[in-house]
Amino acid sequence: MPLVTPFRTSFGTQAERDILLVKVMAGGVEGWGECVAMNDPLYSSEYVDGAVDVLRRYFVPALAAHGHLTGADVAPVLARFKGHRMAKAALEMAVLDAELRAADRSWGEELGAVRDRVPSGVSVGIFDTIPELLAAVGGYLEAGYVRIKLKIEPGWDIEPVRAVREAFGYGFPLQVDANTAYTLDDAAQLARLDEFDLLLIEQPMDEEDVLGHAKLARLVTTPMCLDESIVSAETAAAAIELGAAAILNIKPGRVGGYLEARRIHDVAVGRGVPVWCGGMVETGLGRAANIALAALPGFTLPGDVSASDRFYRTDIVPPFVLEDGHIAVPTEPGLGVAPIPEVLRSVTTSVEWISLASR
């Protein structure tokens, strides 16, 4: 699916998304899952073709051998297989969606949502020039987004942030995301961001350098937020205890599914650490689930749950629309949305059916 505009981060530029969907048919009820892996293993070790392979070769046969499944069964059944959390999350999402549709229960009800709408932030990529950046940020603020996140990298950090603050002031939350582009040697440079009253600095260093983030947190005033480093409730608890994270970004695909995402939320709430929901340029399927997740009580910061038209001119589900800086939480059973058949057909490049009954 082509993006409205190319989205550039410190690890590359996306102009389109090659999206893997998982559809589960159970007792005449269908459930949908979306794998957030990218084309190439740049954000993480996972990538779309690898997810297809591990699903086909290992995960689907394992689920078939288990017999009757609920969403809560998926992670334990697949636990013996190392990694591949994004592929696992897509399967769990599809099974849970079918289960909830059959039970006439919404995604938000299942996770424990306490709000009927969530504040919407937007992630702004790296541009070639400051004027291009300011035009984009101005458009998002005019549209009503309540929080702006700027992607940064060495050479594109202090001046873009300064320009945004000078152009639009301090009356809205602003944060930055480095996607692991820095090292501890850059601490002095990152500390220069303190003057701009940022909400947080997200994942400045390598995902495995949790101790480095703890050291950096003592050298800068701006709160440290971890993204790529958080892959489970256990890693979340460790990062908090080490002082590496004052805030957590929770991405369900990255952590293996929405049920693990809820466990991370609970860990953070128990330790007084705020969380927010990150995005992976999902279609409306993943967006619906993320919006419901962001309605849990511990999600006290605006997440990357932007309107559908932030990334796609035509989504595969009815679009989510920004209203007064917020997006409504779906209330229909399951995800609350399903693909529009003719739209899905128009962007589908291949389909593979695997019958569990035959295995």
Image (cartoon, rainbow, N blue to C red):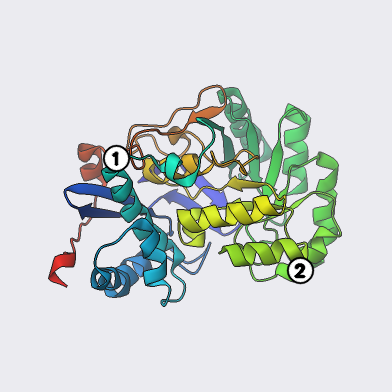
* Label pair 2/1, CB-CB below 8 angstroms: no
Binning the other alpha carbons within 10 Å of mark 1 as few (below 14), some (14 to 19) or many (20 upward) gives some
Q: Residue furthest left?
A: 358
Q: Say which of marks 2 and 1 sits in front.
A: 1
Is 184 situated above or below 176? below
| Residue beneath disc 2 | 212
- Please state if 273 lies on the left or on the right of 289 as rendered: right
Q: Which residue is more in the foreground, 132 or 99?
A: 99
Instruction: Count how many numbered circles sit on residues in the image.
Output: 2
| Residue type, numbered disc 1 | Ala
Is 208 situated above or below 144? below
Indicate the position of residue 328 as horizontal and vertical percent values: 47, 29
Residue at (20, 38) in percent of width and height: 342
Q: Which residue is more in the foreground, 241 or 322?
A: 241
| Residue beneath disc 1 | 338
Gap between marks 2 and 1 measured at Cα: 43 Å
Indicate the position of residue 98 as horizontal and vertical percent values: 28, 49
Residue at (47, 55) in percent of width and height: 259
Indicate the position of residue 198 as horizontal and vertical percent values: 76, 42
Task: Label 2: state its secondary structure.
Answer: helix
Whichever of labels 2 and 1 marks the residue nearer the N terminus, that label is: 2
Q: Which residue is more in the foreground, 110 or 95?
A: 110
- Please state if 103 lies on the left or on the right of 128 as rendered: left
Q: In which quadrant of the rendered view does residue 165 lie?
A: top right
| Residue type, numbered disc 2 | Gly
- Please state if 274 lies on the left or on the right of 121 as rendered: right
Binning the other alpha carbons within 10 Å of mark 2 as few (below 14), some (14 to 19) or many (20 upward) gives some
Task: Label 1: state its secondary structure.
Answer: loop
Residue at (16, 48) in percent of width and height: 28
Q: In which quadrant of the rendered view does residue 345 lie?
A: top left
Residue 7 appears in view: yes
Q: Residue 77's mark?
A: none
